[in-house]
Image (spheres, grey):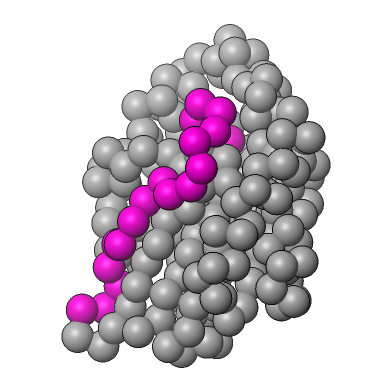
């Protein structure tokens, strides 16, 4: 059995203020660093065999808190970056809604290709899903912690499970420093064991 722990990064100032991050490299804030420090022992207790992270600092620095406890190196993979949000990156979500009302309405409605240069859900799922699968293949029968981003985590997990975007819209977003657990065996393939696991923390934020 191979186990994947898909862990969302800690809080950032842009999370806290509703600003669209996408692939902008925004650092953890004090809360985010504390979330990583307090959550890392829970994941260390799962005895991971490898740690892989998005190369964006908010994910890589979250993973570093676990690496400090386990002694494992953090391998980075740019495919684990958050969804690219095109013209919205750096905008407050309220400003995106005002400047791009049609695209915003489509995004809120779950359109997989809302426009404004935003990466499609299909492309996102394939990108993240491939990175998750490669990480699992590198440690067959082991446990891998993947540190990534809210929207990317949900879409990548859905890709492995074979769930389309209509199903994924019914799945709640990961809170900062919470995780999803997937397991794989030869008889059942990938299956979901747990979702949004972690310490009680700040309210969930939009996965942007």
In the rendered image, residue 142, in percent from the top left (x then y), is placed at 48, 84
Q: Is residue 54 left or right of residue 4?
A: right
Q: State which quarter of the image contains the N terminus.
A: bottom left
Residue at image location 33% in from the left, 78% down from the top: 184
In this view, the residue farthest toward the top is 98
Give the position of the C terminus as an image quadrant: top right
Q: Nearer the viewer, residue 137 or 120?
A: 137
Q: How many marks?
A: 0
Given residues 24 and 45, the one toward you in this image is 45
Residue 28 shows in the view: yes
* Quarter of the figure with residue 185: bottom left
Q: Residue furthest left?
A: 187
Q: Is residue 16 magenta?
A: no
In the image, 13 versus 110, the foreground residue is 13
| Residue found 72% across the figure and 41% down from its top | 34
Q: Is residue 29 above or below residue 69?
A: above
Does 146 sit above or below residue 73? above
* Residue 1 against residue 8 in the figure, above or below: below
Give x and y (percent) for residue 151: 50, 44
Residue drawn at 50 percent across, 60 percent down? 6
Residues shaded magenta: 188-208
Residue 98 position in % (x across, y down): 58, 10
As for residue 204 lying within the magenta part, the answer is: yes
Q: Residue at x 80, y 42 (%)?
A: 27
Q: Is residue 81 left or right of residue 4?
A: right
Tell me residue 47's x, y (percent): 55, 76
In the image, taking residue 49 as reference, residue 63 lies left or right, namely right
**Does residue 76 appear in this view?**
no
């Amino acid at each position: 059995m191979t186990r994947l722990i898909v862990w969302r990064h800690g809080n950032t100032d842009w999370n806290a203020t509703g600003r669209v991050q996408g692939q902008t490299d925004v650092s953890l804030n004090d809360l985010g660093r504390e979330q990583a420090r307090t959550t890392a022992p829970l994941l260390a207790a799962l005895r991971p065999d490898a740690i892989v992270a998005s190369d964006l600092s908010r994910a890589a620095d979250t993973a570093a808190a676990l690496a400090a406890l386990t002694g494992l190196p953090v391998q980075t993979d740019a495919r684990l970056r958050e969804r690219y949000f095109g013209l919205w990156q750096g905008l407050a979500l309220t400003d995106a809604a005002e400047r791009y009302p049609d695209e915003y309405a489509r995004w809120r409605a779950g359109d997989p290709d809302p426009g404004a240069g935003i990466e499609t859900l299909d492309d996102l799922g394939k990108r993240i899903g491939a990175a998750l699968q490669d990480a699992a293949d590198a440690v067959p029968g082991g446990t891998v912690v993947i540190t990534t981003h809210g929207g990317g985590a949900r879409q990548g997990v859905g890709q492995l499970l074979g769930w389309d975007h209509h199903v994924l819209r019914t799945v709640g977003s990961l809170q900062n420093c919470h995780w999803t657990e997937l397991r794989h065996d030869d008889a059942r393939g990938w299956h979901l064991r747990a979702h949004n696991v972690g310490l009680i923390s700040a309210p969930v934020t939009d996965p942007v």
